[in-house]
Structure formats: C-alpha cells, structure tokens
Amino acid sequence: MEKVEMDWGNIGFAYHKTPFRFVSNFENGKWDEGTLTEDETVVINECAGVLQYSQSCFEGLKAYRTKDGQIVCFRPDLNASRMADSAKRLEMPVYPEDKFIEAVKKVVAANAAYVPPYGSGATLYLRPYMFAKGPVIGVKPSSEYQFRIFATPVGPYFKGGAKPITIKVSDFDRAAPNGTGHIKAGLNYAMSLHAIVTAHEEGFDENMYLDAATRTKVEETGGANFLFITKDGTVVTPKSNSILPSITRRSLCYVAEHYLGLKVEERPVEFSEVKDFAECGLCGTAAVISPVGKIYDHGNEIYFPSGMEKMGPTIQKLYDTLTGIQMGRIEAPEGWIQVIE
C-alpha cells in the first residue's frame, strides 16, 4: 500500500477513516478468531447491554514511524493488561492479552500507509474498545460482546508548541473511592462531559478533580494524570485507588528515575501543597505532557514558577526523553517498543 499523503501538521486530533479495523465477537462463552474488515459500521440490537447499562471499556495507544523508518507501537502490553482489568471490573469477558497485541499489530500493518512520516509530529492513533452487544433488559451483564480496534491518523496535539494551560478545581466529583475511577470505562468519561464543557465555557482548559471523600487530595483530570515537580527537582505523582493508572505517567516516572536520575514519589498529594510545587503537567497518550501554568480555585489563583509561556525545565526534559524513546532517537528499555514492520 502506497503511503498516503496528508497535510500532517493540520489534520488535527480528530477521526479520519482508515481502510481496515479488527473485529472479534464473544458468543456462547468464547471469543472467535477475529478478522480485519473494511466495514466501519457497528450493528447491534436495540436492547444491547451497552445501550441500556453502559457496559463498555476502551484503550488508546499510538503507532509511530521512527527515525530509521520502522513502524512501532509503544508498550501495547500495558494497554492489553489495563483493558483486562477494566473488563473484569465491568463483568465483561477478558479479551486475551496476547491476542490483543496481535490485533494491534494487524491493524497497524494493514493501515501502514496512514502512519505519518517521522518528524511530522503526527501519529497513528489506535482505539481498542469492547462493548456488550447482547440484549439485556434486566440489570445484569450481557452474554454477548464485541471487541474492536480502529486506527486514525492524528495531528500534533499542540499546534505551535505546548503552551501552558489554565485549569480549575472542579466542583464535580470524577470517581467515588470504591467506584470505577481506576479503570478505563466509557461511563467515567460520559459523566465528565458536563464538567469539561462547563470548564470550557468559563474559559479554562481542564478540570482538577479532588478526591470525592474529603475533597482535600489531588486526583486527576477527566482524561490525564498529574505530574508535579518540587523546587528541588523531585517528581511527584498522586496516588489513589480511584485514579486511572496512566501508561504515559508510569513511563515518565521510569524515565525520570532511570534516565534523568531524578527522585520519584508516588503518594497522596494534598491540595494545600500544590502552591509549593515548581512545575505541573498533565500526562496522557494524546499529548504526552501538557504543561499547566495556572490553577484557579474558587477565586484564588495558583501560578507555577515555570510560568505561562513554555514547559518548565524538568517537564521539558521528561517530554523530550520519552518522545525520543518513542520515536527511536533514544534507546528504549527492554520490551517498551513493539516493532510492526
């Protein structure tokens, strides 16, 4: 397949249809072998469990074209493992982790022409997801499910560089202490939509959610984990049972300790100590790290010393090192890079 030519710098972080996707069905107590298909439509019963009781989960990862021309994926084994955790919590059948990785490789290889060129800032985003397709009218798990993966090329998350964003302390709660905040369930994101729309209407880029039990500890945003940098250069990330374990955050913490020689702490973070940090960032698949310049807390403003013009120095080093690993400019830890072709 000939490489597709697109205006990679201007395609935006949006859906663009590619030729192939992977589909596998769970019926009669087992998964079928699955197949690649060119049909992007999903046909389900009007009483499907996903429509009635929101039984669904998903993942997000990327394929890159590296400096030497290879196409690779970044740590898909962790996405497979996290999706297994999500499925178990939602009483859905686990899609086998080895088959998950095989399906990722098949989708990327089949859509290789849509993997953006090295240096363009664009990538091929992959969305594995699973949902209940069998009819359910009583409140119970479905007996039939579908697992799918589609691919879409996406442009750079930040056009013209990652400028620090402004976030607000939300009045809404993201997840209950013993709820589903630690898994990637679609329902978590549905309940966050009103909060993010409200934040945007008020002129903020994102929300900072505090713990629902005491509203004194930092949790995460609607779709990213927090990283803080202390004034002595220690990397601090909040720890809570209701935070989604971000693969990007885990990778950045490893990079901080083993590549940059920084001290790393994963611990509960009191909101009262946020004002004392030197830098703040939001980390996730889409942008790697989004620098935060200001937090608005009900009339009080917290400005970080790193400022509103550019990433702070430590967050910049973390960003450069991790993207260097992903793009093949820096040697990766063993097992982090899955070569597709």
Image (cartoon, rainbow, N blue to C red):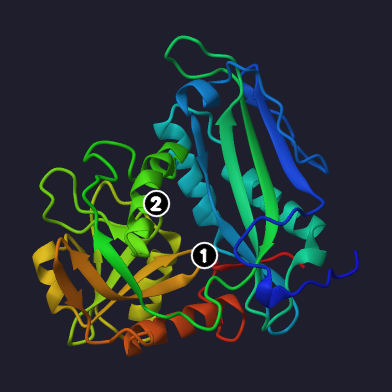
Front residue (pair 170, 269): 170
Amino acid type indicated by mark 2: Val
Left or right: residue 321 compared with residue 169: right
Q: How far across and how far down the image is residue 52, in percent?
A: 50, 21
Which mark, by number, is residue 286? 1
Asked if the residue under mark 2 is in contact with the one under mark 1, i.e. CB atoms within 8 Å, the reply is no
Q: How far across and how far down the image is residue 277, in percent?
A: 18, 78
Q: Residue at x 11, y 55 (%)?
A: 216
Residue 9 location, quadrant: bottom right
Front residue (pair 296, 24): 296
Left or right: residue 195 compared with residue 105: left
- On the image, numbered disc 2 is attached to which residue? 197
Q: Is residue 65 visible?
A: no
Q: Is residue 212 visible?
A: yes
Amino acid type indicated by mark 1: Ala
SS for dot 1: loop
Front residue (pair 114, 75): 114
Q: Residue at x 36, y 82 (%)?
A: 315
